[in-house]
Each structure stands twice: as C-alpha cells, then as structure tokens.
Amino acid sequence: MKYPIVSVVCSVLFVAVNADIYLHSPRGSNNRHDENTRERTNGNRLFDSQNNNRGGYNVGTPMKYYAGSNLQIEWTNQHSCNNENSNCELILQYMCNSDLRDGTRTDTILEHEAISKDQTFGMHEDYEYYLWCSLRERNKGLFTADQNFDNKHTAKYTRQDNQGTRYGYECAEERDYYPYWQPSPWKDIAILTNNAKKCPYYQSESQNVKSRWGCYFSFEDLKKAKYQIYTFPKKSLPNNKEDCEKTTVNSIRGVWIEFPTHGLPQPDCRETEFSRDNHLGNGLDGSPNLYNWTLPNIDETKCVFRIRYNISTGDYDSWSTTADYNGNPTKLDLSDKYVLSSAEVAKNRGFVFKGNPNVKLFADANFELQLAVDTSQYGRTFQDRTHVFSIKERPNSLKGAVIHNLNVRGKRGNIVQVYPAVEYDFVPNTLNIMTGDYVHFQWTGSDKNPPNNAGQGKAGTDRNNALLLTSQLYPEGNDVPFGPGPVFGHYGNNYPNSLNNAFFLDLRKTDLIQLSFLKPNAADKDLNNADPYFNLEPVKVTTVGTYHYVCTRNNNFSNRDQKGRITVNKFQMENEALGYMGGVMTSRDGQVELTADQGVFDRLQKLTLEVWPREEGVRRMKIIGVNLSTKEMYSSNFVVLSPQTELTAPGKKFQFRMQTDPGAENVNIYLLSSDSGLSSWNKVESAIGKDGVARFTASRGGVYVAKSDSYTVLITKWFKEANLIKRSARDTV
Ligand SMILES: *[C@@H]1O[C@H](CO)[C@@H](O)[C@H](O)[C@H]1NC(C)=O
Ligand SMILES: *[C@@H]1O[C@H](CO)[C@@H](O)[C@H](O)[C@H]1NC(C)=O
Ligand SMILES: *[C@@H]1O[C@H](CO)[C@@H](O)[C@H](O)[C@H]1NC(C)=O
Ligand SMILES: *[C@@H]1O[C@H](CO)[C@@H](O)[C@H](O)[C@H]1NC(C)=O
C-alpha cells in the first residue's frame, strides 16, 4: 500500500508544470515587438502565451511564402509530449485577414472601438470578436476546480484566466479550449496529441469542416449590450439557443444563427513526437520537434501562425471532468488514481484537487508534505504566434512546382543571451529535395536585438548569408557518406568556396553574389549595410548532389556555427510521419501508393518511400551481393520503404499498390528487408491485374520489386539499411 503512494507523490510533484512553448521557425514573437531588452516589455500585447518573459523574436520585414510551398515548423516545448507522464496536445493554426498587423509599439491595444483602428497597435483578433467574447456567457459546464467565479459570467473568465485579464483581443475561453464551440477566426492545420484515438473527434469537430452556432447580435447591438452588462455584472449574452431566443437585452433580441465552416479539409491529426520534461530542446533523434506544413493555396498579404501547447495532469481525467466537480475540491475522487480505498480516505489524507494540499504519506502517522498544486495551472495551455507574413499566389513560372522554403531561425547572441530563443541556424538544417524542385531562400531579422549580445558585425543586428563551403579536401564521416551524388562543399571546414568556381545548386553567378553579399553594390565585410531581410526568388535545382554551405558572418567556430546541408536526389522520395490515424503516401509519379487504415500503426512511424528505376535497383543489389544482375529479370521499379522493420500493430497490414509491367508472366512481388530475419527474397501474396497494377498488403519496410518466380537467389551478404540506401546512392550521378 505504501509503495504506490510514495511513487505517485513524486509524479504529482513533477507534474507541477511550467511548460513553455517557443516557436523558432517561422519565428514566434512570444509577444515581443522590437524591444531591445532581453525580457519582452509586455506579455499581454497580442495573446496569452503564459511563457517566460525571455524568449521570442523581434519583428522584421514580413516573410513572403508561396502558396502550396513546404514550410518546416520548428518549436521547443518545455514539458514532455508523447510520454506517459502527462497529456499533451499541440494545436497548429493560422488566420489571414487584411486587418492583421504587428503595429509599431509594445503596449496592448485598448478596449475601445475607435482606438482599435489605430495602426500603431498590433492586432490579431479584432475588436468585435473580443467584444462578443467578453459579453457572452461562459460555458458553465467546464471544470473550474476551486477557482472563484463570483460575478464572472462571461467567456473572458476561465480557470486559467480567472481575473479576465485581456491579451490583445484574444478570447480566453477560445484560447483555453479546443475544439472551441463558438465561431473562431483560426483555421486548423494540425493537431498533434499523445492520444491519437481522439483524432477522429478533433477532425470532425474542427471548424474547418463543422459549422458553429451562436447567438448573433450586430456590432451596434453588442456595443449597446456592453454598456448594460458592464453596469449589471450578473448579465451576459446567451450562448445557447433556448436563452438566445427568449433574451432581449435593452430591447435587442438575439438570433440563433449558423456560422459557416471555414470550408477547408479536415486538419491533420497524429501523435506528437517524443520530447522529455524540463528541456527546451530537440526530439529523440536529435532533430527539432517539427511539423511539415504545406501552405494553403491562397493569396493573402497578412497571415499569422499560432501554436498552442496544452499540457494536462494525469491526476484526474481532465477530458471527462465537468462543472459537476466545481467548488468543493473533495467532489473529485482521486482515490482510484492513488490506490486509496475510498474517496473518504483520499479526502482525509489530503489527496484532493485544490490549491497546495498537504498529503499524509502514511495512513497511520502524521507525516505530511505540501504539494505545489495550483488548480489554474494543472491543465494549462501555452502559446506562441508569429509576426505577420504573407502567402502569395504563384506566378505562372512556378505553377505546379515543388517549392521548399529555406529560412533562418535564431537571433543574435550567445546561447545564454538568447535562451529560451535559439542561436542562428538554417531551417531546414538538412533539406532533402528531388531534382526539378525549387528552393526559396529567404530570411528576416531585426536591428534591435539587445546591444550587448555577442555576435559579428554591428551591435544588435541580425544578418545572414549563404555560401558554398570550400571544396572537399578529404572524405568526411565514416565509410557511409551522408547524401546522394557528388559532395559540394566541405562540411567540416569553415571557409567558403571562391565564387569563381563555386557550384551551388545550379545557381547563376548573379544569384551567388546576391546570396553572399545581399546588397552587392554596397557590400561590406560584415553585411552591416544590407537589410536584415533577404529574398532570392525560388531557384530550380537539377544537379544531383550533397551541398554544404555556410553563413560567413555568424560562423564563429568555437562559439556558434551557422551551416546547412541540401541533398538533391534523382529518385522519387516521400517522407511522412504516419501514426494511429494512418494515411496515404504516394510517389510523385502516382505509380506507387501506400495506404494505412486507422489502427494499422500503433505509434508514429516516420516513413520514407523511395522508388528506384530498375537499373538503379540492380546496381544497388550488386553492391550488396545479390547476383540477380540484369534489369530484365525484374518487372517493376524497386520500391523501398524505410525503416526496414516490422512497422504495424500486431496482426495489422497496410495496403500497397505498385505498377508492374503489364502482361508479364509468372511474376510476383518479392520483398527483401535488409534488417533482421529477412536475408532472401520473400514472395508476397499479391494480385496483379492485366494493367500490371499489383495490389498487396504488408506489415514491414524493405525493398519491394516484381520479378519472375524462376529467378531465386540467396543473399549471402546483406548490409544495414543505411548502407544499402546511402552507400549506393552516393555513387549515383
Ligand atoms: C486542453 O486540455 C483540456 C483537457 O485537459 C481540454 O478541456 C481543453 O479543451 C484543451 N485545450 C486546448 C486549447 O487544447
Ligand atoms: C568570435 O567570437 C569570440 C567570442 O565571442 C569573439 O571574441 C570574437 O571577436 C568573434 N570574432 C569576430 C570576428 O567577431
Ligand atoms: C519533414 O520533412 C522532411 C524533409 O522532407 C523529412 O526529412 C522529415 O522526416 C519530415 N518530418 C515529419 C515529421 O514528417
Ligand atoms: C555470385 O556470382 C559470383 C560470380 O559469378 C559467384 O562467385 C558467387 O558464388 C555468386 N553468389 C551467389 C550467392 O550466387
């Protein structure tokens, strides 16, 4: 009996969260504008972040992304995700609207209609939205624990914001709860959760696809109602149909109306990647926590991206605990969770959900410890938002192209000075693309970082450039080179290549000069005369290879590095993280498709799907010692799914479709997995139609190819997956 209690008490203590979230790419403001102090001036400027006052990035010239381009979102979250010690949700959203603005000052926009138009104040949600929120009855079915709500009737009061503090024009109730039941201007991109079984619920409830209903009053009526409600604080505007239809406020009658959906597809929803507690850093595999966002096909000059991080304690079932448990803290029975015999025992020993309870650790002796419980923070949402950016329609020359954004994160300073923001880095630090894709180099920055922050060039300024590194002097790494094709630029060195003979991504000399000097006609060695904002229109990349580049200004070897890598692959390659919800991966030419139904994967799998033409497959087979050495022996391309392990939940399979030669005889799909157990071709049960389309189910990664049954072969020598793919890819140009 004593055991579980003691260990559980420890976990309760750990759960006392201060779990910030900071957005690094695109940069999050954390409510900063462009103050040159380490702390932000005003944490209430636009939204409630609940973050530490440090962190956040100053505003710069707005970024301009192309519609439909790939943008890698990177953040750090301080508490854990995908870890059993708490519940975690990350909600990624955006909004576009011509009234959005960063403003030019750090104070909060006033709660005043005329002043709401003053462009010097930053503004995201608008005045009318806030007005309605601040007058509308709050959802009284919500669990508010022992927080006091006397005379606090409207949606601006929540368990987490019990004082109704205003942050820009954000609505506290909308901020704290998702999916939110009233209309919201925020459009859903993705929900990442440690309980992906909730995904169908999130997806179907999203305002992307489901309309909202509300008690509508015109702006004029709201203004009148405000006056009245503020005078009689027990009043509020109804939030439900019944009350709406019978309520008149100052002779204004509400109308219960439907607010249409955003008319967008369901948001993506999947597991979060793992991150540990008390650590603002990378995920498990050493790369940042990230989400690959394909920007919507819109043409909007003013958009903002927002990420919320909802972390709730495992002490009670926060999703099914309602207002029935409000007030008296002993109503919420924690006895089950803490292996105590009854609610009564739990209560007597202090295992109750209230502010700073004292818990008795033994049933029969008076040893008590106080727990740091704050019921406004157990179950808490953090947030960060970008400054304003635009999503531009593509010119005709870029229609249909795959565009990858290549940006810079971080700000001037050493690691201590910038924390919890980060130092400079290119994003994605390693960018993997296919020949024919476009790279869009663009970055922004500020000239008003704290003046004492370490760095090169003029105090306080952010500047970046990108130059190919000096050509390779000796092979790097082990015997497994990193990327495909020839290597351009020596990653381990710190000098740039001469621009006279630099071969960097098919870039023209004029572009190389731009990327190096930013402002060629007024160049100075530290780039001080250039603008912190830089944009090179997307460039098409056709030459296979692995490119290493550097920012000359910020690469101060023993202090800070700013280098990046781009790999350009000749063959089709798709990356996708699929989890419990499943999904579809399709090769670019449409000839290969993997479909996983809900439940096929029981955790997040970061999959890579490659297609090698058969000459290439044969060449690589030879390298690993497979003597099936002519391409005529194969009746399809080689389809490679990584990681080459068992991927599915026990007994579950995903579906595969791939093209084989129509009409070939005695042909079947074979699988070779270079990891444990499979050292020979294994026949896969498949149905191949007259059109040559093969359909089959499978549960593991490996190399899938169609071949005649008469060619059998033993594989005597097989390499690890990395060698199989990377070593041979290297030789390919
Ligand atoms: C956070 O989680 C709680 C349950 O613990 C839920 O009621 C709330 O809606 C969530 N809020 C957000 C913004 O995800
Ligand atoms: C590189 O960093 C060190 C330590 O911060 C500093 O002393 C030195 O001046 C820097 N180099 C340049 C060129 O700024
Ligand atoms: C995001 O995209 C990159 C490059 O395409 C890929 O390497 C990475 O695995 C993707 N990550 C996730 C979580 O989808
Ligand atoms: C592959 O071919 C080589 C040369 O023809 C031969 O020496 C070797 O035994 C063969 N290996 C297998 C597994 O058939």
Image (cartoon, grey):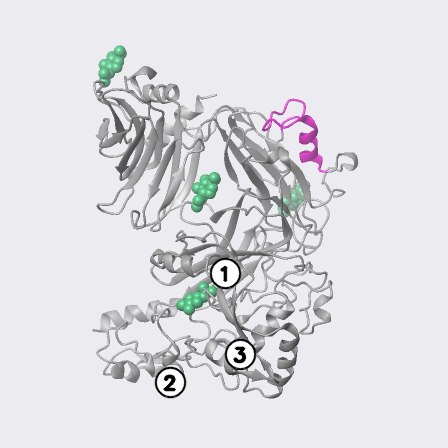
Indicate the amino acid at tag 1.
Arg
Q: Mark 2 or mark 1, which is nearer the start of the sequence?
A: 1
Q: Is residue 329 magenta?
A: no
Given residues 217 and 543, the one toward you in this image is 217
Residue 565 in the image, given as x and y percentages of width and height: 53, 35
The residue pinned by badge 2 equals: 328
Given residues 625 and 263, the one toward you in this image is 263
Q: Does the beta carbon at disc 1 come under 8 Å from ligand 1?
A: yes
Indicate the amino acid at tag 3.
Thr
Residue 358 visible here: yes
Q: Quadrant of residue 525?
A: top right
User: Looking at this rendering, what residue extends furthest in the right direction?
Assistant: 522
Q: CA distance from mark 1 to mark 2?
A: 30 Å
Q: Is residue 498 magenta?
A: yes
The residue pinned by badge 3 equals: 154
Secondary structure under tag 1 reads strand
Residue 719 visible here: no
Total number of numbered discs in the rendering: 3
Say which residue appears at 60% left-offset and 51% top-offset: 414
Say which residue appears at 55% left-offset and 43% top-offset: 68
